[in-house]
């Protein structure tokens, strides 16, 4: 009798490179957890202000090439708006996973859809979108495979403790 079935390939976090955009309080917390799971943590600073941290800073192109996982925890501003677009996805690993936990317009929804459909990156997890609530014509709605795309509400801020 078979008691388990693995139809999808999955990997350990240990040994992966976790890239972080936005190394403020939340980004630093994520970096610590990623490190605790055995990831090498690197970061990209759009503002250039982040300096005194124990992680390796990379220029954007190298950051994209090296990262197995990218999590975004940055504010939306002139330097981060549309930062993850077609050109960025073209430089990422085909096995990369993108997590946008910052602000929606940091990632171009149409370009992300194309990257996922064409296998330029492996998957994305979003709790923010370019325009919210999601519109009926958002191209991300074409992706029906939850191993490629998961969209959740941006509600982590809503706990009683966070609001207190």
Image (cartoon, helix red, strand yellow):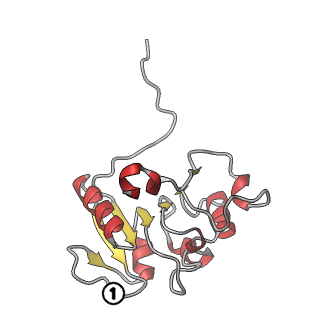
Looking at the picture, how far across and down is residue 47, in whole percent? 41, 86
Task: Say which residue appears at 64% left-offset and 68% top-offset.
Answer: 130
Q: What is the x, y in percent for residue 31?
A: 29, 63
The single residue placed furthest to the right in the displayed view is 137
Reading the image, the residue beneath label 1 is 49
Quadrant where the C terminus is found in the figure: bottom left
| Residue 25 horizontal side relative to residue 141, left or right | left
Quarter of the figure with residue 17: bottom left
Q: Position of residue 159 (x, y in %)?
A: 42, 50
Residue at position x 34%, y 73% in the image: 23
Q: Looking at the image, how many numbered discs can be counted on the residues?
A: 1
Which residue is more in the foreground, 6 or 128?
128
Q: Residues within 10 Å of mark 1 (few under 14, many from 20)?
A: few
Quarter where residue 109 is shown: bottom right
129 left or right of 96 in image: right
Secondary structure under the numbered disc 1 in the rendered image: loop
Q: Is residue 124 above or below residue 77?
A: above
104 or 37: which is nearer to us?
Answer: 104
In the picture as drawn, the residue positioned furthest to the top comes out as 1
Task: Specify the quadrant of the image occupied by residue 70.
Answer: bottom left
Give the quadrant of the N terminus. Answer: top left
Foreground residue among 37 and 78: 78
Residue beneath the point at 63% across and 71% down? 108
Q: Position of residue 50 (x, y in %)?
A: 31, 82
What residue appears at the point 47 percent right and 53 percent down from the top-left corner?
158
Residue 134, placed above or below residue 146: below
Q: Is residue 38 left or right of residue 126?
A: left
Left or right, residue 110 beside residue 15: right
């Amino acid at each position: 009798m078979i008691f388990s079935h693995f139809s999808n390939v999955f990997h350990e976090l240990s040994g992966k490179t976790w890239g972080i955009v936005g190394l403020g309080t939340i980004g630093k917390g994520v970096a610590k957890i990623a490190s605790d799971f055995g990831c090498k943590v690197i970061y990209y600073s759009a503002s250039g202000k982040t300096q005194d941290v124990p992680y390796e800073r990379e220029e954007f192109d190298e950051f994209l090439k090296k990262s197995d996982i990218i999590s975004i925890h940055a504010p939306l501003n002139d330097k981060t708006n549309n930062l993850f677009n077609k050109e960025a996805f073209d430089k990422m690993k085909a096995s990369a996973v993108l997590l946008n936990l910052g602000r929606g317009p940091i990632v171009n929804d149409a370009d992300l859809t194309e990257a996922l459909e064409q296998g330029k990156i492996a998957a994305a997890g979003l709790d923010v979108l370019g325009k919210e609530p999601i519109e009926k014509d958002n191209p991300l709605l074409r992706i029906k495979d939850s191993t490629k795309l998961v969209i959740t509400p941006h509600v982590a801020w809503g706990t009683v403790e966070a609001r207190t």
